Image (tube, rainbow, N blue to C red):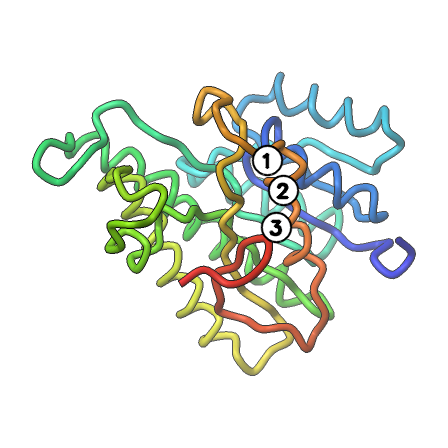
Amino acid sequence: MEIHKGKIALITGANKGIGYEVARQLGHQGITVLVGARNAELGEAAAKKLKAEGLDAHFVELDVTKPETITKASESIASRHRHIDILVNNAGILQPGDGPPSTADAKAIRGIFDVNFFGVLAVTQAMLPLVKKSASGRIVTVSSGLGSIAWNADPTWDFASYKYLGYNGSKALVSMFTVQLAWELRDTKIKVNAVNPGYTATDINGNSGTQTVAEGAAETVRQSLVGDDAPTGKFFETGGEVP
């Protein structure tokens, strides 16, 4: 725990589900956790729950689709903390109307991309100057196995029938983002990786997932805390790498 004490972590969409659990687990490592959420009431309540566990937690208003909140959040963090050691891009959505290419609603796909990709891009670009001020920054994006093109092309895969052009496509783009940003930062100590949490019981799937939230958060937490000799530009899940 002492090895991570004093670090600052920002987690988007951290008022519930995997984001909240990532914040909780990082907080128990002695890390100051910034609970990013678009809803102030829910974000404050989440931070209060974490504080009740003895954690150093603070709500940060941040809607990944609203540039003004991203800018305000980065300015507030810069003023108060000076840097970010761990950025976890967790916020993500599904949308009614998403589906296979022949029937998927274009408006739904745009809405998904706004959060799942453009939100990740906007937040990372805004926070990167703060991450660069860390001795060894970590950028972790919560993705999905549904974003693996190799798995999508495998008819024997357990989730082969889950063909959602918007959601799967947005997560595939997260992989490209991860690889390219890692390459761009290859001469720094910053590690940039994506994580497949697995089929976890959260609101996004009506709590139908087969994993607990703690299990779903585990690999994101691990990637947030890896050493300077760890890989970068990869797609991980508990137990190994995702193709």
Q: Is residue 178 left or right of residue 100?
A: right
Disc 3 element: helix
Q: Quadrant of residue 97?
A: top left
Q: At x 63% / y 42%, what residue is drawn?
A: 217
Q: Is residue 107 left or right of residue 145?
A: left
CB under 8 Å between discs 2 and 1:
yes
Which residue was labeled with disc 3?
220
Q: Is 57 positioned to the left or the right of 110 in the image? A: right
**How many numbered badges does the structure rendering display?**
3
| Crowdedness near tag 2: few (<14), some (14–19) or many (≥20) residues, C-alpha within 10 Å | many
- At label 1, counting other C-alpha atoms closer than 10 Å, the crowd grade (few under 14, some 14-19, many 20 or more) is many
Contact flag, marks 3 and 2 (Cβ < 8 Å)? yes
Instruction: Name the spot of residue 53 as percent of width and height, x first.
Output: 86, 28
Q: Mark 3 to mark 2: distance in Å?
A: 5 Å
**Marks 1 and 3: CB-CB under 8 Å?**
yes
Give the residue displayed 53% in from the left and 26% down from the top: 202
Q: Residue at x 63, y 25 (%)?
A: 43
User: What residue appears at the point 59 percent right and 29 percent down from the top-left corner?
Assistant: 17
**In the rendering, which numbered label is found on residue 18?**
1
Report, in whole angstroms, how far the alpha carbon at label 2 lies from the one at label 1.
5 Å
Q: Which residue is mark 2?
A: 217
Q: Position of residue 137 (x, y in %)?
A: 66, 64
The span from disc 1 to disc 3 (Cα, nearest Å) is 9 Å
Q: Earlier in the sequence, mark 1 or mark 3?
A: 1
Compared to residue 31, the image places residue 100 above or below, namely above
The residue under label 1 is which amino acid type? Ile
Name the kind of residue labelled 2 in the image: Ala
The circle on residue 80 is none
**Residue 200 percent across, percent down from the top left:** 53, 34
